[in-house]
Structures are given as structure tokens and as C-alpha cells.
Amino acid sequence: MKRFTWFNAVSLTLGFAFLYIPMLILIIFSFNSSKLVTVWAGFSTKWYVSLFSNDAFIDAAWVTLKVGFISSCAATVLGTMIAYIMVRGGRFFGRSLFSSMIYAPLVMPEVITGLSLLLLFISIGLDRGVFTIILAHTTFSMCYVSVVVSSRLASFDVSIEEAALDLGCTPFDAFKSVTLPIIAPAVISGWLLAFTLSLDDLVIASFASGPSSTTLPIKIYSSVRLGVSPEINALSTIMIAIVTFGVLTTSIISKRAIKRQRLEEEQAFKNG
Amino acid sequence: MNFRKYLLILIPYTWLLLLFLVPFIIVVKMSLSDTEMAIPPYYPYFTLSEGWQGIVNFFSELDFENYVFLAEDNLYWKAYLSSLKIALISTAFTLLIGYPIAYGMANAPPEWRPTLMMIIILPFWTSFLIRIYAWMGILSQEGFLNQFLLWTGIIDQPLTILNTNIAVYIGIVYTYLPFMILPIYASLEKLDISLLEAAKDLGCNRSQSFWLVTMPLSKAGVIAGCFLVFIPVLGEFVIPDLLGGADTLMIGTILWQEFFANRDWPVASAVAVVLLLLLMIPIILFQRSEQKQREAEQ
């Protein structure tokens, strides 16, 4: 029975066109030599040049990368701890409060998370800046990391861990040499998710940042509010290129890893 | 061993208590305070210097005035209702557009599917702000859509789309489409082809077997997709702010304005608490339907 119909082909084509045409237009017009974003006047890379000589953007990009890197590392450690507790921890006092505190940030509107963190920082007298943005980003992305890691933890065989403990490993050794290698792909994708969430966040960062710490999304937002500008097109193109490259590379690497694992398993099977 | 386990629990637990629960309690407390033209712009604030009497005074000064204000002012009612309306309509459009795409993916040859998945997920990794920004250039008066429509001769006057609710709907559908497609695709992919063959053998044509077999069996994915779009859209800020106009009322933008423009922290906090109460309904419904789904699968 043939399943893929003309209707399917048309809806996929239209759907993908809807998803990608806006971004293609954005990329094409970043090479436009006219200041008017919507009128084509010839090929030029001058907006990239002016972008890289704009210190405000470069500074904001550094702040964003710094915040993204530190917060995603912290979120990965804390999120993996949470996942381990939730999947292997058994019963403990306050477990249901703990699990609702993990899931709540996933559905909480960003404006509320941002507002509540800002009020906290003000009431304990913490000056807002890079540090407070890192705290805020770590808090919401650790919940996403824990969801990604716990699904992987739940799906693998506990008896391997138990065997390691029986063979004399300390719990920490067993985690390091048995559990961690198995959940590593999930930990890595959790880190990537936390990193992109942090790079992408505007609302929470706007609440948590001070005057001296502008992240790239805050900078983009304030210039976009004034209208479309070719420099922002150039910046967007760079960001889209980096993300596309990153996603494609990780997917190719993970596909290869799966293939290699399958080959090794087959080899092991043949060898008896 | 036990000591280590509790240490392991204690670190993330304390983190979440301090940076999630405590801030939220502060919001609730703030929503019961009064607005002051001072720094900080609210009253009363909590000090331990006045001892027990100070604490008693602190609690006796709290009241529901801000909530009364919200209930009496038409603006807030309209904003909550209009957020609900925008969220409902855009969820419906996302479903209408997302379902055929998910259906097409599920019907595609198995060797295409990972690539198709990648095509759907890739935009999700690119910046949200950039995806909204891309539409600003398309929908404006002299934007690409108007240029295209004028060129084809469908219209002879440029349409005003940017800064209207239509632009907001387009923006929401565009950014939340992957959230609708993925759960529907997941439920369609699991569908047993032999059921469709059975329907065909029993005399169903293509559209009958779609409505009688495929559609009911993908219900779980449709419900999950709708909630995954509806819940975040209700509190959306960036899309209505950049694509919407003066007549676009959404509660996320109201909260932002109360806080940053009016500097009325107590009212902003009350708006946040009401929004959260409003969100509890779809969230609880969603959890129930997920639980039912899990029980049905077992």
C-alpha cells in the first residue's frame, strides 16, 4: 500500500517553505548594500564589517557567551544531580515538593520567573549584573537538563550499577566509571540545550541584568524595537550559521557513534 | 552512604528553594503590599530591627487592595480575556497547519524521517528573537509580502499587517509550530499500518479511514501539542511586543509595562499571581490527560 501521497508531499513542501523562507530572506538581505532592508541594491558585505566594528555588539556577545558557558555548565551538574536523585534516590523527605519545583519552571511564563528573581535580588541587596543573569539562567536550565538526563537514566539497566557496587566500587566510583559513560550523550545534549536556552533568553535576562551587563538578545531587542536594520540581519545570519553548523555536526557525530557501537556489538557477537 | 545521599539531595534542593520558591513567595507578598513613590517603590518592607512588633505590623499592613484594583479596572479583564482569545485562536491555527505536516512526515518513507525531523527541529535551535525579527521585514508596509502581492496584482494598496493582531497570530504559529508537529508526529508514527489496511478491506476509502482510524488514534498527540502551544502563548511577551500593535492586549506585555514603565511593582506582582492561577487550569488538565494516556498504554 503506497502511503506517501501528493497531499503529503504538498503539505510538507509548503510547511518547510513556511519555516525556512523567512530565514532565507533574512540571510539574503544581510548581503544587501542598501540601508533599506527590503530593497535589493546589490551584493555587499559592509554590514558584517560595520557589525564587527560595533563595540556594543561585540561586548554583548562576550557577555552572552560567558553567561551561556558558565550557566550551562552549572545547570548540567545540578540537573544531572537532580535526575540521579529523582530516578535512583528512592523516597526522601519533601520529594513531591522537589519534583514540582523541577517541573514548574518548565511551564512558568518567563515574565513571572524574571519578575520573581528580580524581586529576590533586590530584597537581598544583590547588585544586578553578569552574576545574577548566571544564577537566573542556571535555575531554569537545570530543570530542562534534569528532564533530558532522567529519561536516559530511567531507560538503562540498574543491575550494571549494582554489579559495580558489588565488585567493590564506592558509589562515586560506580557513578563515574559506569553510570556517567552510559548517560554521557544525554548529559551532552542537556548541556547543549542549556547553552542555547541561555543564548536565546531575552525576558529573564532583561529582569536579571543591570545597566552594565547587556546580553546579545537584550541588545538585539532594543535595536529591533526601533525597526529593521541590516546590521541585525548580518548578526542573525552569523547566529543561524553557527547553530546550523553545530546541530548538523552533533547529529553526524552521534549517528557515527551509534553505527560504531552497532558494529562493535556485531563483532562481539561473532567472536562469541 | 546515607549522609552522602542527603548531601547530594541538599545542594539542588536548596538551590531550587532559594531561587525558585522563595522568589515566588516574595512575588505573592509584594502583590499584597502598597505602592509607594519611594525607593523601594512599595510598602511595607520586612525588617527584623523592630522585633516582634515589626513583624506584626508588617502582616497587618498587607491587604488585597491590588487584586481589587485589578478586578475593578477594565484594562486587566480585557487583557486576560484577549490573551485567552489569542492563545486559543493561534493554537487552532497551529493545529490546522501542523497536522498535515506531521501527517506527511509520518507517511514519508522511513529512511527520510530522520532528515525530516532535523528540518523541523533546526529552527527551534535558532534564536527565538531572530525568528520574530525575520517577520518584521516581511510584514511591514514596504515589506516582502506587500511587494509580492502588489507585483502579482492581487492588491493595489499595501496591506497593514505589522502591528496588528494578524501579525501576532502569524508570529505565534511560526515560532510554536515545531511544538505542535513533534507530538502529533510521534503518535502518528506509532500507528499500526495494518489497521489502515483493515479499514480499506472493510470498504473505507482514504478519507473515511483517515477520519475513522488515523484521527482518533492520533488524539493523544493532538492534545499534547495543543497544550504545549497554548500554555506558553498565554504568557507570551516578545511576539505581541514586536509584532503587535496598540490594540494587541496581552497579559505578558501588561506585566512588563507595569513593572518597567509604570514602576508599579505591587500591581505587576498581582498581575503575575492572577496569570499563574489562570495557567493552573490548562496545566492540571494537561497533566490529567497525560496520566490517562500513560494508564491507557499500560
Image: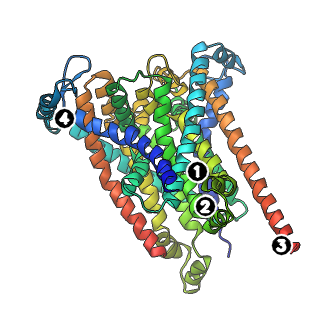
Label pair 4/2, CB-CB below 8 angstroms: no
Q: Can you identify the residue that label 1 sits on?
A: A15
How far apart are the two marked residues, 4 and 3, measured between alpha carbons?
68 Å
Q: Are marks 4 and 1 on the same chain?
A: no
Q: Circle 3 sits in a helix, a strand or a loop, which is it?
A: helix
Q: Chain of mark 1?
A: A
Q: Is residue B271 visible?
A: no
At a point 74% along the width and 44% down the height, the residue shown is A249
| CA neighbours of label 1 inside 10 A, class few (<14), some (14 to 19), many (20+) | some
Q: Can you identify the residue that label 4 sits on?
A: B32
Q: Amino acid at mark 4?
A: Leu
Q: Can you identify the residue that label 3 sits on?
A: A269
Residue B296 against residue B91 in the figure, above or below: below
Q: Can you identify the residue that label 2 sits on?
A: B104
Q: Chain of mark 2?
A: B
* Left or right: residue A58 compared with residue A226: right
Residue reaching furthest to the bottom: B202
Residue A264 against residue A175 in the figure, above or below: below
Q: Quadrant of residue A95?
A: bottom left
| CA neighbours of label 3 inside 10 A, class few (<14), some (14 to 19), many (20+) | few
How far apart are the two marked residues, 4 and 2, measured between alpha carbons?
52 Å
Residue reaching furthest to the right: A271
Q: Are marks 2 and 1 on the same chain?
A: no
